[in-house]
Amino acid sequence: MDIGMLWFDNDPKLDLSEKVQKAAIYYQGKYRQAPNLCYVHPSMLPTVKITAGAITVRSHQAIRPHHFWIGYQREVELQSPPVTEPSDS
């Protein structure tokens, strides 16, 4: 991700898509660029990857529950599969 912002939202009244859109509105106002990628904790995502409007939402174990790492990533990088870290075997 080229530029990212950490966002917190634990509002039980909003679904995941609404929370991502709320973070995106703030992000766009602050950085003057629309985000296209958001990472969330795996427990928040029903599948490996979804979209919320024009934003791709992916899970990453390093993100804490109710936190959103939202930002902009070049399209070429969005199309490639996420990098997995080697296990300690």
Image (spheres, rainbow, N blue to C red):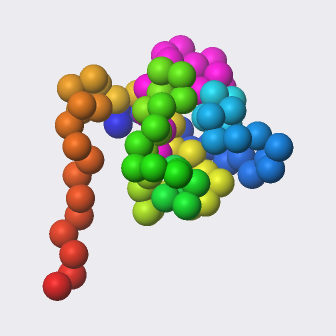
Query: 87 above or below 79?
Result: below
The number of numbered badges drawn on the structure is: 0
Q: Nearer the viewer, residue 66 or 32?
A: 66
Q: Is residue 12 magenta?
A: no
- Quadrant in which the N terminus appears: top left
- At x 63%, y 28%, the residue is 21
Residue 57: give x, y in percent of width and height. 46, 39
From the viewer's perspective, tell me whether residue 22 is left or right of residue 49: right
- At x 54%, y 22%, the residue is 53
From the viewer's perspective, tell me whether residue 54 is left or right of residue 21: left
In the figure, residue 24 lies in which quadrant?
top right
Point out the residue furthest to the front here: 47
In the figure, residue 20 lies in which quadrant?
top right
Point out the residue furthest to the top here: 32
Residue 38: give x, y in percent of width and height. 48, 38
From the viewer's perspective, tell me whether residue 89 is left or right of residue 78: left
Q: Nearer the viewer, residue 64 or 29?
A: 64
**Which segment did they paint magenta?**
24-39
Q: Nearer the viewer, residue 76 or 26?
A: 76
From the viewer's perspective, tell me whether residue 79 is left or right of residue 51: left
Q: Is residue 85 visible?
A: yes
Q: Is residue 31 visible?
A: no
Residue 14: give x, y in percent of width and height. 76, 40
